[in-house]
């Protein structure tokens, strides 16, 4: 019995010594796995020919029945007086409907919109249901002859995009995506070259909702439902004054596409499914 006690005492003493030794080992000598920066980066496309900004139009057609609803939060740099006069360039009812329906979405926001509605911009940007992407600061066109929009000079294009990101940060949007939508969807080789240093993926669409200035929600819904295919990107708008029927149309679109077996995703998921390859034109 005495020998057994002695053996137990020795074992306990050895265990205590090893514990003390481990505690005294400097933390720097304990190997730790390095954090993976790659895993935290949003998916983007590889640069296009000659290193130009890549353009994304839709996700793969064979990767399941997914669809991305995207909403342009438009406001041009010179529309401040109209907003001050009561015109509404936001649409909180639409955002509330997406939340109620639990629909992930990508909001392409102008910097001017984020300045006008910073509380809403921050709320959207911090909601995991949504992702915020760049729609320029001023909503001026990056080409000539684009739906009558004022134009940005070639030497100011990159600065306009970066100014929008600065406006998002100031509003409290924590992680805006490296995706850019050209105002009016208008771009050319010069615009793609000008934005190459910004490191963004340009995001177009393959389904036009027709909601801009529309008042017939059923007509908007029909146009979307007729156009959606697996991997589609649908362009809609998040401005009450310019797209007053969008919220009602979304309430018709969402249940019908779900009935057809579609799953709603953000643009980032479609780009990730593309594996870095452009699907422009597919």
Image (cartoon, rainbow, N blue to C red):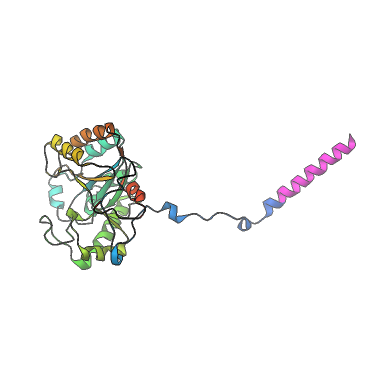
**x and y percentages locating residue 49 in the rendered image:** 29, 64
Q: Quadrant of the N terminus?
A: top right
Q: Which residue is at the far right?
A: 2
Q: Is residue 30 magenta?
A: no
Classify residue 254 as left or right of residue 214: right
Is 145 on the left-hand or right-hand side of 13?
left
> Residue sitting at 78 percent across and 42 percent down?
12
Q: Is residue 105 above or below residue 179?
A: above
From this view, report whether residue 193 is shown above or below residue 246.
below
- Where residue 17 appears, x then y in whole percent? 75, 49
Q: Is residue 276 left or right of residue 237?
A: right
For the magenta stretch, what is the residue range? 1-20
Out of 204 and 19, give the one closest to the viewer. Answer: 204
Asked if residue 174 lies left or right of residue 240, the reply is right
Look at 89% across and 38% down and name the residue there: 3
User: Would you say the magenta stretch is mainly helix, strand or loop?
Assistant: helix
**Count of numbered labels shown in the rendering:** 0
Please determine whether, in this image, residue 209 is positioned above or below residue 28.
above
């Amino acid at each position: 019995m005495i020998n057994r006690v002695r053996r137990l005492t020795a074992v306990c003493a050895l265990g205590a010594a090893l514990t003390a030794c481990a505690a005294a080992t400097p933390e720097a000598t304990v190997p730790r796995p390095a954090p993976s920066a790659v895993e935290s980066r949003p998916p983007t496309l590889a640069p296009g020919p000659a290193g130009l900004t890549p353009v994304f139009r839709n996700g793969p057609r064979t990767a399941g029945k997914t669809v991305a609803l995207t909403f342009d939060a438009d406001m041009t740099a010179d529309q401040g007086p109209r907003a001050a006069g009561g015109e509404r360039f936001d649409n909180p009812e639409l955002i509330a409907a997406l939340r109620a329906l639990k629909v992930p979405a990508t909001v392409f926001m102008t910097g001017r919109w984020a300045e006008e509605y910073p509380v809403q911009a921050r709320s959207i940007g911090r909601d995991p249901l949504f992702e915020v992407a760049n729609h320029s600061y001023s909503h001026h066109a990056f080409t000539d002859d684009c739906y009558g929009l004022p134009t940005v000079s070639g030497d100011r294009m990159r600065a306009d995009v970066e100014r929008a990101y600065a406006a998002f940060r100031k509003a409290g949007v924590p992680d805006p995506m490296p995706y850019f939508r050209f105002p009016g969807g208008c771009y050319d080789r010069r615009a793609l070259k000008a934005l190459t240093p910004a490191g963004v993926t340009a995001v177009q669409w393959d389904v036009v909702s027709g909601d801009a200035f529309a008042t017939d929600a059923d007509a908007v819904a029909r146009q979307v439902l007729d156009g959606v295919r697996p991997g589609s990107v649908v362009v809609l708008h998040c401005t009450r004054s310019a797209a007053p029927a969008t919220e009602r149309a979304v309430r018709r679109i969402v249940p019908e596409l779900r009935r057809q077996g579609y799953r709603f995703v953000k643009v980032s998921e479609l780009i990730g499914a593309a594996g870095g390859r452009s699907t422009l034109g597919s």
